[in-house]
């Protein structure tokens, strides 16, 4: 047997172990485990200790991991709920998308960055991390409260808006500049894809149900969902969007059937294995040596803008309900996560986003994710009194 | 975004889809799905349609898939049962290991093959596929019968003997010839490793239980099991054995705690996703153009020897109980599976086994796996009358 598998296995072991160990430490400190997994990548990656050199296979595994992060997010998002949650959530989401994008784009552009790079930073500031928000709300046992429903509904809408923006950004990454016709086609494609996947695709799954149940292979529903996940990921990439958008919508189309087929725990097991490679590789591409002088300053400013724009933007549509409920929703929408990191990584891979800009986005993600849980806990407890 | 992920996603989609579709067809014909997955690889692989060219990342994914095949097999094998099943199963297993190895090695050697190649063929004929046998017994609803227990117990022992032999074979593959001192050390290492993993490792898990339950990260037991699976796979490869031996023993050490931590369904979900890549890649390396004249003749002879040696070898220790029970056990031990294919692949990768020999082993695996289920069904039904 040649020695390549041995090297791969060692890298896979070290990455998984370190991600889980630092994740455990973070959980005990009351911080999200995902930040710990990213930190493990920073420390062991090529810019610091260099225990884990860059490796194509690991990056491929990381990419498949990203697909399962979004597939699981989709599985937990019922399209029916999305349609029902209605006006408030959509208003909150839209305000929470426009404000960060405008502020992020504006600041970068004013300080002399390229237009495409400014668009990437703006796009990375848009999407709230449903996963982290839902986790915090569940920990606080307030998931059934009205505010929590508004937050989650808006977070999902804004994930989709973020996805559409990501499609646009991924489209940009395939070109050297902005072609407005292309941009229009891409937005149209992304919107049509999103509408089809929310309104039509779940009905297709509904019709397929009986057929899937009659299949003879073991675990036919999981196999069917995985086939569609891979197909839609490839298709999304093929038509110029990011692969993970396809994965998210593949999850969404199965969301209503997940309990019946017990899909969620199975998809979650695959996620548990592969996601650490994704978050680790995000960290491993972060050059911490860059955080000096102007980069650190920009990172701090962008983080503050990311916090203010979400909190104020999302609170505004609810200002009639008093400052505390409005602020709770705003803070609930604050944490950025997977989508921001994926946007930044797409830009980095396409060499449109520079290393310092990538570092700024990762910094902003970490700051918003670290601050949201304690603030949210405080606001919900104050509200309960 | 560059185009590499798109190509990888397309390959992953096509492989998964074709493996599942042909697997479904096979299940409907009453054949094991795994043979269908291999056939999909033969048809789409480089030696036939060439839709899926050789790709390092896909091979790496396939290798991780093989690790989960054996990790799951280990999870389903309680070390306590192994120790309890006792004398009969061990006798059946030993006879069922010696007879095929001697016949396979002898025939290849007599017809002029190299000693190392003859050892590989003999080793590939040794291990009964626990997975396929257990599946057939479960389908026949006879799992609780005494004969079924003997078959399963023997299949597990013989898997372990096969593993030890595989360790030896993998050790050979690392060298150009046989060094007897090295061989002795390897057998000693493999035996010590096996004894440690069966007798000591489960106690370590027992002691770890409380600690694992107190961990804060989500799904800590799965994370712990995966860490040990990757560690032991790497360790096994590191000390000159095959990586999958480590994975099997990692599963074994968690087997008794799998129900409590619901590990099996989670590990199985990962298996469902990754295993098709392994079986597909087994098929894709099979050059069907080789099955002419002498290769076809050898393939047929080896298949007949593989059947006779297992049936007669495993039936002999039970001859006192009458011909039907003895024959039932013999036929139950007949199907070869993952281990045979992994042995052959290890040899092929190390360029010790030639393409024709690899083809012969895959052919033998297919024949024994196809014939066992109907024969077993017949014998159990006759016995019930």
Image (cartoon, coloured by chain):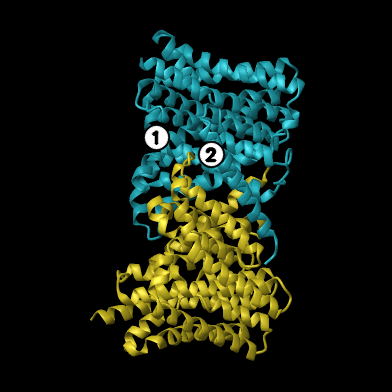
Chain colours: A cyan, B yellow
Label 1 sits on a secondary structure element that is loop
User: Dot 2 corresponds to which residue?
Assistant: A24
Q: Residue under mark 1: which chain is it in? A: A
User: Residue B109: image x %, image y %?
Assistant: 64, 88
Image coordinates of residue B356 in percent, x first then y, are 64, 78
Q: Is residue B239 left or right of residue B362?
A: right
**Element at badge 2?**
helix
User: Left or right of A216: which side holds A284?
Assistant: right
- Percent across and percent down for residue B263 are 43, 53
Relative to A275, does residue A286 appear above or below in the rendering? above
| The furthest residue to the bottom | B110
Percent of width and height locating residue B10: 59, 50
Residue in the image at 41% along x and 8% along y: A320
Q: Which mark is residue A78?
A: 1
Q: Residues within 10 Å of mark 2 (few under 14, many from 20)?
A: many
Q: Quadrant of the C terminus of chain B?
A: bottom left
Residue A303 vs residue A190, the one in the foreground: A303
Residue B343 in view of the camera: no
The mark nearer the N terminus, 1 or 2, is 2
Q: Quadrant of residue B120?
A: bottom right
Contact, mark 1 vs mark 2 (Cβ under 8 Å): no
- Above or below, B137 relative to A188: below
| Foreground of the two, A286 or A109 | A286
Q: Is residue A159 above or below residue B74?
A: above
Residue at image position (62%, 57%) is: B60
């Amino acid at each position: 047997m040649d020695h390549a598998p041995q090297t791969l296995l060692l890298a896979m072991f070290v990455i998984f172990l370190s991600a889980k160990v630092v994740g455990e430490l973070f959980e005990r400190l009351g911080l999200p485990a995902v930040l710990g997994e990213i930190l493990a990548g920073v420390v062991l990656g090529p810019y610091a200790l260099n225990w884990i050199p860059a490796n194509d296979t690991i990056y491929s595994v990381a990419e498949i991991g990203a697909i399962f992060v979004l597939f699981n997010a989709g599985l937990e998002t019922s399209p029916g709920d999305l349609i029902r949650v209605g006006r408030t959530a959509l208003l909150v989401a839209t305000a929470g998308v426009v404000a960060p994008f405008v502020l992020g784009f504006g600041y970068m552009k004013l300080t002399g960055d390229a237009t495409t790079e400014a668009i990437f930073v703006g796009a990375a500031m848009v999407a709230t991390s449903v996963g982290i928000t839902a986790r915090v709300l569940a920990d606080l046992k307030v998931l059934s409260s009205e505010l929590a429903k508004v937050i989650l509904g808006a977070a999902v809408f804004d994930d989709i808006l973020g996805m559409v923006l990501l499609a646009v950004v991924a489209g940009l990454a395939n070109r050297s500049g902005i072609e407005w016709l292309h941009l229009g086609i891409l937005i149209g494609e992304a919107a049509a894809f999103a509408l089809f996947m929310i309104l039509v695709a779940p009905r297709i799954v509904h019709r397929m149900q009986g057929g899937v149940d009659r299949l003879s292979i073991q675990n036919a529903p999981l196999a069917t969902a995985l086939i569609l996940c891979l197909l839609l990921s490839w298709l999304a990439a093929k038509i110029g969007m990011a692969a993970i958008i396809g994965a998210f919508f593949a999850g969404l189309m199965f969301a209503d059937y997940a309990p019946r087929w017990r899909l969620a725990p199975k998809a979650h097991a695959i996620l548990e294995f592969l996601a650490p490679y994704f978050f680790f590789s995000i960290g491993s591409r972060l050059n911490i040596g860059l955080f000096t002088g102007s980069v650190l300053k920009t990172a701090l400013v962008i983080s503050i803008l990311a916090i203010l724009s979400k909190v104020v933007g999302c609170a505004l549509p609810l200002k009639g309900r008093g400052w505390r409920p409005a602020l709770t929703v705003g803070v609930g929408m604050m944490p950025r996560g997977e989508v921001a990191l994926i946007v930044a990584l797409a830009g980095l891979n396409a060499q449109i986003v520079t290393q310092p800009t990538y570092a700024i986005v990762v910094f902003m993600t970490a700051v918003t994710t670290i601050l949201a849980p304690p603030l949210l806990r405080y606001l919900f407890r104050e509200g309960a009194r």
